[in-house]
Image (cartoon, rainbow, N blue to C red):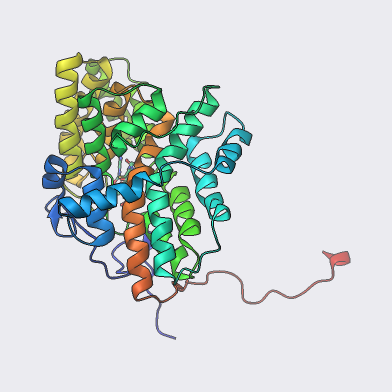
């Protein structure tokens, strides 16, 4: 047999073809269906970007209004989903609650054949519109607060913050959050998107595929990193001590959360946008020691880790922005998920257009000469 190729983490392996998004890690370029993420973040709402990813084109005004109305009609959750969220221990991580509720949604609607495009589209709308409601509802429930029903007069971003906090956000906060949703919507064949495609490739339905993607996103090397960034930053007493902290982390071979990326070997373009947003937010609403510490880390990391191609990624500044918006740390990854579901679903649809079940091979390194011994003699 020919020598099998093995690439840990599938690094460099082409595992599929896609028209959804392009991540150019050498030049720091991210495209959603050909559009630069910087342009989309500046000019578009999340609803427009979700349409772009899912339908394949930026909508005109009439298309956007129709798509938005379809989503708004699906923001409310079945009462049974709220009951499931109420049944969970209050200490449940919101990602676990989101994963459970996403899978459970399938039970509230007619059984879904993954090949039925119309029914799957309906389910995709339901997930895109409903996942934010799940996250907000669970957050209220775990605090012992009443669930806030969706308000369809609001944009997805403003409604989410209203359902979460029980009060309307300022226009500025809603737009900032909207931009965060745009920035997290798509990122090529990352672990969670790939997970969604792998699950979809077995013709599992969209609920099973999206809940699996949520599980993949929850890990600290993927979406969970944005929580870990703040946890780490909070252990550094001051900006003056940041360089010594970083040196110690490097010397003891520990990872600095929010730095490094499998694909980007330059600064993640999303980190640049978030950094500018953070800088604006902190300059108008007052800086915090944490922001100053992050800044000091980035500066020193450019010298120590930059030459190795390790630069800030999207998670480095997103947590700081979310915290300034008053969002709790363990909600950061769910916020990522409620945006990324649009990218996941776009990939899922693409996978099914030309599907072949994923079944890679392995390099077997186990025994080949084990002999059976009766249980009484082992
Ligand atoms: N801090 C310190 N060193 C880092 C680092 C970080 N954040 N990220 C990578 N490195 C180092 C590794 O220790 C390794 O060093 P070595 O060659 O001396 O062993 C080298 O850079 C290559 O790292 P590796 O983990 O093999 O890269 P990867 O492509 O497999 O992993 C990540 C990419 C994202 C998993 C990794 O950079 C990481 O763990 N970052 C922190 C978590 C994070 O922010 N994740 C969010 C990604 S959007």
What residue is drawn where x is 25% and y is 54%?
51
Residue 74 percent location from the top left of the image: 41, 47
Task: Tell whether 25 sits left or right of 148.
Answer: left
What residue is drawn where x is 25% and y is 40%?
314
Residue 48 percent location from the top left of the image: 21, 49
Q: Nearer the viewer, residue 169 or 278?
A: 169
For the C terminus, which image quadrant?
bottom right
Q: Nearer the viewer, residue 157 or 248?
A: 157
For the N terminus, which image quadrant?
bottom left
What residue is drawn where x is 41% and y is 58%?
122
On screen, residue 102 above or below 200: above
Tell me if I can see residue 138 in this picture.
Answer: yes
Question: Which residue appears farthest toward the bottom when viewing the image?
Answer: 1
Q: Nearer the viewer, residue 323 or 159?
A: 159
On screen, residue 127 above or below 4: above
On screen, residue 2 above or below 305: below
On screen, residue 289 above or below 248: above
Residue 287 percent location from the top left of the image: 20, 15
Residue 40 percent location from the top left of the image: 15, 46
| Quarter of the rendered structure image containing ligand 1 | top left
Q: Nearer the viewer, residue 68 or 45?
A: 68
Tell me if I can see residue 267 in this picture.
Answer: no
Task: Tell whether 101 sits left or right of 236.
Answer: right
């Amino acid at each position: 047999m020919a020598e099998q190729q093995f690439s840990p983490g599938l690094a460099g392996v082409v595992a599929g073809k896609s028209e959804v998004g392009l991540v150019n890690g050498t030049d720091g370029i991210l495209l959603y269906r050909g559009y630069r993420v910087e342009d989309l973040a500046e000019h578009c709402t999340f609803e427009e970007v979700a349409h772009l990813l899912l339908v394949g084109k930026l909508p005109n005004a009439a298309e956007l209004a129709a798509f938005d109305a379809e989503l708004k009609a699906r923001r409310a959750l079945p009462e049974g989903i709220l009951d499931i969220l109420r049944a969970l221990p209050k200490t449940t991580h919101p990602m676990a609650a989101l994963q459970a509720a996403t899978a459970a949604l399938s039970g509230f609607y007619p059984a879904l054949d993954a090949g039925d495009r119309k029914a799957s589209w309906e389910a995709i709308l339901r997930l895109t519109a409903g996942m934010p409601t799940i996250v907000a509802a669970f957050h209220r429930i775990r605090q012992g607060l009443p669930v806030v029903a969706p308000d369809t007069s609001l944009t997805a971003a403003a409604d989410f913050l209203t359902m979460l906090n029980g009060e309307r956000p300022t226009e500025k906060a809603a737009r900032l959050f909207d931009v965060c949703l745009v920035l997290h919507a798509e990122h090529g064949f990352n672990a969670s998107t790939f997970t969604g495609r792998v699950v979809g490739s077995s013709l599992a339905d969209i609920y099973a595929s999206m809940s699996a993607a949520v599980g993949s996103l929850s890990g600290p090397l993927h979406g969970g990193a944005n929580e870990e960034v703040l946890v780490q930053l909070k252990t550094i007493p001051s900006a003056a001590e940041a360089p010594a902290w970083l040196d110690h982390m490097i010397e003891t071979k520990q990872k600095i959360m929010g730095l490094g990326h499998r694909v980007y070997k330059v600064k993640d373009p999303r980190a640049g946008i978030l950094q500018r947003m953070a800088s604006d937010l902190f300059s108008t609403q007052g800086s915090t020691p944490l922001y100053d510490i992050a800044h000091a880390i980035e500066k020193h990391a450019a010298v120590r880790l930059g030459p190795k191609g390790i630069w800030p990624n999207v998670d480095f500044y997103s947590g700081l922005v979310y915290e300034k918006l008053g969002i709790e740390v363990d909600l950061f990854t769910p916020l990522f998920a409620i945006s990324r579901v649009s990218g996941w679903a776009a990939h899922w649809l693409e996978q099914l257009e030309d599907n072949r079940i994923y079944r890679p091979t392995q390099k077997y390194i186990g025994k080949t000469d084990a002999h059976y011994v009766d249980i009484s003699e082992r």
